[in-house]
Amino acid sequence: MKKTTITTLLFFLLLGLISNLLRAQPIIIDHNCAFLEPIPESAILQARDSLHIAYGHTSHGSQITEGMNGLANQSTNLIGYKGDIYCWDYYPENMQKDNPCLDLHDYFRPGDLGHNGSIQWAISTRDYLDNDPESDNVNVIMWSWCGGCSDNTYDGIQTYLDTMNELEIDYPDIKFVYMTGHAAIWADETVKANNQHIRDYCNENDKILFDFVDIEMYDPDNNYFEFVNDDCTFYDSNHNELGNWATSWQQSHTEGIDWYDCYAAHTQPLNGNRKAYAAWWMFARIAGWDGLVAIDEKSTIDFEIKLSPNPTTAVSTLQYSISEKSIISLKVFDTYGKLVKKTDKTVQTKGQHNLTINLWGFPKGVYLCVLNINENKKTEKLIVR
C-alpha cells in the first residue's frame, strides 16, 4: 500500500474518532435535575439572556410555567434561591432593562401533543415559525402531553418521535424539547411503555428530554414510587391507595424554605416546584451549562451496587447508595469490549438510587455494567437470556 494511501486512511480514522468524541450528548432532565440549589446564578443568567422559548401545552403542561411563576415571587429564605433572576415574560414591553426576564412565549399555539399519532401540534409549529413575526428570534420549542401517553399506541408515539426529528432537520437553528407524558395510575402499563419508548429514543439519538413523569415518581429525598398518579398519590401493585408523597413531604417540611406554595393543575404545589426547578436546569443546559456543580470528581466514596433481576430477559434495575452528593454515570459493554449503552453524567444527592438498564433488542449474553461515582468505578456482570 502506498504511503499516501496509508496517510489518507489514518487521517480519516482520526477524523472519525474526533467526530465521535465531539458527538452531541443527550440532555436528560429528570428527578435528578429537580433541585434549585445546584444551578449556578451565572447559568440562570446565561439562559435568561440567550434563550427565546415557545411553549405549547394545556393544563398538565402548565405545571411547569405555573411553578416558574411561583418561583419568581419567592424570597432568599427558599433553599437555593439566588435572588430576583427567575422571572419570565414574553411581552417585550414588560421586560425591564435593569432586570430582564426569560423570554418564554407561553401557549404560543393552542393545544398539546394530542392523541393517537396526531401531528396538529407540528402543523401549528411550522405555521408559527414560517409566518408569525413573534417567532423571529425563537431558538427553543417545547410541547407537552396532556393525556396522550395514556391512550397512545407504539406507532402513535413513533409518529411523534419521527415528526419531532423532521422538525429538527427542517429548523436546524432551533432546539426542540421532547417530553414524556404525566403519570396515570389507571393506565399505568400503557403510560410506562410509551414513556420508556420516548426515553430510549432520546438517549439513543442524543435528544433533549424533559422527563415529566419521572419527576412525579420521586420525592425530594429521592424516594421512588413505582405506582403513582399525576396528583402524587401512590399505590401498591394492586392499585390500593397508600398515600400522597407530595402532601406528606410538604407537611413535614417548612413552607417558604424547603418548598413554596404555587398553583399546579391536577397536582400538588411541590410537584410544581420540582417541575420549575427542572425547567430552569434544562434551560441552563441548553444555554451551555455542563450540569456539574462544585463536586470533587476524584473524591473517594464507598458504595455497593446490585442488579436485579439478574439474569434477566432484557431489563434490570441497578441499585446503589451514596453518602454524599456525587457525579454519576453508567457504561454498559458487551464481552468484546464494545460500548453498547451509556448515560450522561448527572448530579445526584445522597441516598438510595435506582437506575434502569434496558437491553431490549440486544443479543443474549453477558454484559459488563460499569457504574462511575466521582471517578470511582464498580463493575457488575449482567446476564441477558
Image: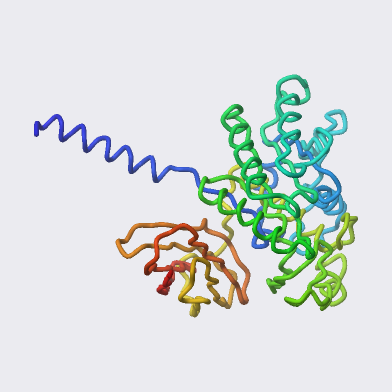
Residue drawn at point x = 50 percent, y = 60 percent: 360
Colouring convention used in this rendered image of the protein: rainbow
Q: Between residue 239 and residue 370, name the one nearer to us.
A: 239
Name the image quarter holding residue 81: bottom right
* Total tally of numbered discs in the picture: 0
**Quarter of the image that includes the C terminus:** bottom left
Residue drawn at point x = 87 percent, y = 75 percent: 251
Percent across and percent down for residue 133 are 77, 20
From the viewer's perspective, is 312 left or right of 222?
left
Q: Between residue 90 and residue 247, name the one nearer to us.
A: 247
Percent across and percent down for residue 280 are 71, 50
Q: Is residue 188 above or below residue 49?
A: below
Q: Is residue 317 above or below residue 88?
A: below
Name the image quarter holding residue 177: top right
Percent across and percent down for residue 63 are 82, 52
Q: Is residue 85 above or below residue 310?
A: above
**Quarter of the image that includes the N terminus:** top left
Name the image quarter holding residue 367: bottom left
From the viewer's perspective, is 296 left or right of 175?
left
Percent across and percent down for residue 173 are 60, 29
Residue drawn at point x = 70 percent, y = 36 percent: 141
